[in-house]
């Protein structure tokens, strides 16, 4: 009995923020000049979420419904009309209708990476240049639906796919070992978690950089102890360089 | 009328240090578990060299002549006999007879990257998995011989080749723009210089991390201003994580 959305409304994308160009701070594309399109809304609620302003529906009023053309216009404005990498993040960008953004952007020479926990598969995943699957470890208090995850993997065939796992502690680490063992075909990136994520309303909140660096060193040591040489270990550069500040 | 070296002596490699496994802290292979073989001796003397203990002949007594088999034995010991990436660095590793190290290592499943300024070409460059060409910018006070550099590029055909340029200031930056323009086929990595490199005898010397981070932010801004989106900008993670400490 609910309201039936008009065609145009169904194709609107809820956008939390569009910013850049700056470098991608983490993962497989670390260091690559990127404009970020962060969508609003998430089917997860990770215990240590570092993007609550794009997740918690309390912030829904700050999310702007935009058409694909609106989004690409803003990306083109920020990038001076020169193609570069666009990172689709969130929230969970996989719950948004992004096919048309990718189509429009590709036509102008832009590349697209999307990062998702792997809970919702979309047919247009295969149109991406890179699909980053980042299943959430035990410390998140989330439960991975592996059938849904495998559906994402199947949907992403044609894109470069990588596995990125955030690690806070030994339990997460052991979990990552198991998960990586299930997906030996995926290039693997491990990332120490930021235990001082910003509260959604305060991007000047201080990062415990000493603690973040210590966790990175611990993770490197742990990987080397286990001779887990297939894993690539990378920190979040943007946290080191810009703290919790948004828009960089 | 100098001494004629015996065959075996000519094939000895001067090694400053072999350490790891740890992560590669910079460049294209950032985050990849790696054992480093740092050779002793260099045909350059960069103004801001961060590895003087492997460059200055005052430290020659600390360099050990080793056979290829000696080196791979030590790499295998450090890596627990499990293949991983070996980074050949220096000094300038290109002035050492490393063909046999690569041959032996490949037979055991090890991969090899070599980083050189591009002043001396070797036929065995083509046997590498990755050749990192890092021509030195004006702040180094060195003068690049571009014919020699192009000979390195020719010798490296068959290896993945990348260009890595260290940048200290605006003059270096403008120089990097020119150089990158000459080699559009090479993936490009820019790296802010460490203006507080360790003196060769003191690896506990403090890094000006605030200054290093500021230079990284400046370089990111500079690249974005120019819409130089082909450049990938990465810091030296090991400096952030372990300071000037050697062997990590």
Image (spheres, coloured by chain):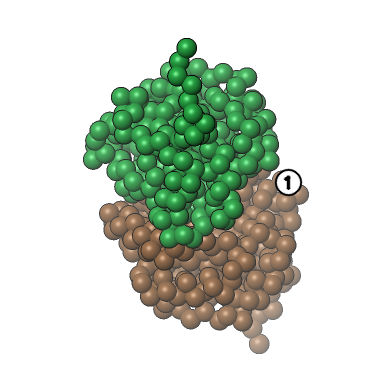
Chain colours: A green, B brown
- From this view, report whether residue B190 is shown above or below residue B32: below
Packing grade of label 1 (10 A; few <14, some 14-19, many >=20) is some
**Picture quadrant of residue A3:** top left
Q: Position of residue B141 (x, y in %)?
A: 41, 78
Q: Position of residue A113 (x, y in %)?
A: 54, 43
Tell me if residue B135 can be seen: yes
**Picture quadrant of residue A50:** top left
Label 1 belongs to which residue?
B108
Tell me if residue B245 can be seen: no
Residue nearest the viewer, comparing A102 with A232: A102
Residue nearest the viewer, comparing A121 with A72: A72
Residue displayed at 64% across by 35% down = A156
Farthest residue to the top: give it.
A1
Residue displayed at 63% across by 32% down = A123
Residue displayed at 38% across by 75% down = B171
The N terminus of chain B: image quadrant = bottom right
* Secondary structure of the residue carrying numbered label 1: loop
Residue nearest the viewer, comparing B114 with A246: A246
């Amino acid at each position: 009995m609910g309201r039936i959305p008009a065609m145009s409304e169904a194709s609107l994308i809820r956008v939390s923020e569009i910013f850049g160009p700056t470098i991608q701070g983490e993962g497989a594309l670390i260091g690559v000049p990127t404009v970020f399109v962060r969508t609003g809304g998430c089917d997860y609620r990770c215990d240590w979420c570092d993007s609550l302003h794009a997740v918690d529906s309390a912030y829904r009023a700050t999310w702007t419904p935009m058409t694909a053309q609106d989004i690409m216009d803003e990306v083109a404005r920020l990038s001076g009309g020169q193609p570069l990498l666009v990172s689709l993040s969130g929230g969970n960008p996989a719950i948004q209708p992004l096919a048309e953004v990718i189509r429009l952007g590709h036509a102008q020479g832009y590349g697209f990476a999307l990062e998702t926990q792997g809970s919702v598969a979309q047919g247009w995943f295969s149109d991406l240049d890179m699909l980053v699957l980042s299943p959430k470890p035990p410390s998140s208090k989330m439960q991975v639906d592996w059938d849904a995850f495998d559906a994402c993997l199947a949907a992403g065939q044609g894109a470069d796919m990588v596995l990125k796992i955030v690690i806070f502690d030994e339990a997460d680490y052991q979990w990552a070992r198991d998960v990586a063992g299930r997906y030996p075909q995926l290039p693997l990136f491990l990332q120490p978690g930021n235990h001082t994520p910003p509260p959604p309303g305060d991007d000047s909140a201080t990062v415990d950089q000493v603690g973040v660096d210590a966790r990175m060193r611990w993770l490197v040591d742990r990987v080397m102890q286990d001779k887990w040489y297939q894993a690539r270990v990378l920190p979040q550069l943007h946290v080191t360089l810009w703290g919790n500040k948004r828009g960089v």
